[in-house]
Image (cartoon, helix red, strand yellow):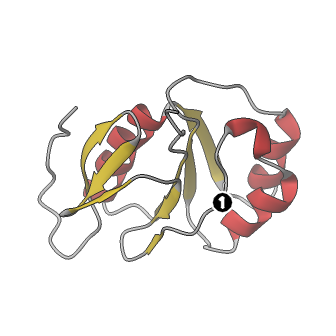
Amino acid sequence: MKLHQQNTPNVNTVRAFEPGRIKINDQFYGNSLLVTAERIDKNWTVKKAEELTIKIIRELLNYQPEIIIIGTGLQHHLLDPILTLTSTQQGVGLEIMTTEAACHTYNILIGEDRDVLAALIIEDLD
């Protein structure tokens, strides 16, 4: 799915999503990654929503975003409420949705100049 492009120069923007990969700016990524307006961390090791822990949420909080969006892959997964509580206790919103929806939401928030971290799970299709 091609995503609507935002007019946000010099900012990481998701250009397309399809099962197994995401296009950010002009590059495709086939593994889970973390994305902010200025940074792409392609070494995020989470491969499925069930791997998310309090430790991982705390690592995401180190980015000091206003909001964290977690894309759980092709299917929406509910997370343990303690993970959301860990984030909200720090004053950071935490939203859970499919990775496709997370890409779209990330672009909207970046277009509004919000400080957002997208944690995007890209599932292996094998």
Q: Residue at x 54, y 39 (%)?
A: 123
Q: Position of residue 117 (x, y in %)?
A: 51, 60
Q: Residues within 10 Å of mark 1 (few under 14, many from 20)?
A: few
Q: Is residue 51 above or below residue 10?
A: above
Amino acid type for the residue under numbered disc 1: Thr
Residue that lies at the very extreme toward the front in this rendered image: 126
Along the horizontal axis of the image, is 66 left or right of 87? left
Residue at 49% x, 27% y is 74
Task: Give the left or right position of residue 89, taking residue 113 as reference.
Answer: right
Secondary structure under the numbered disc 1 in the rendered image: loop
Provide residue 9's location: percent of width, then percent of height. 14, 71
Residue 48 image-quadrant placement: top right
In-image side of 84 versus 17 (left or right): right
Q: Quadrant of residue 115?
A: bottom left
Residue 105 lies, in percent from the top left, at 38, 41
Q: Is residue 8 left or right of residue 119?
A: left
Q: How many numbered callouts? A: 1
Spot occupied by residue 71 in the image (x, y as percentages of width and height)? 53, 40
Residue tagged by mark 1?
Answer: 45
Report the quarter where the N terminus lies. top left
- Which residue lies at the image location 57% right of the left edge and 69% below the top edge? 43
Q: Is residue 116 above or below residue 59?
A: above
Residue shown at 61% from the left, 73% from the top: 63
> Between 103 and 124, which is closer to the camera in this rendering?
124
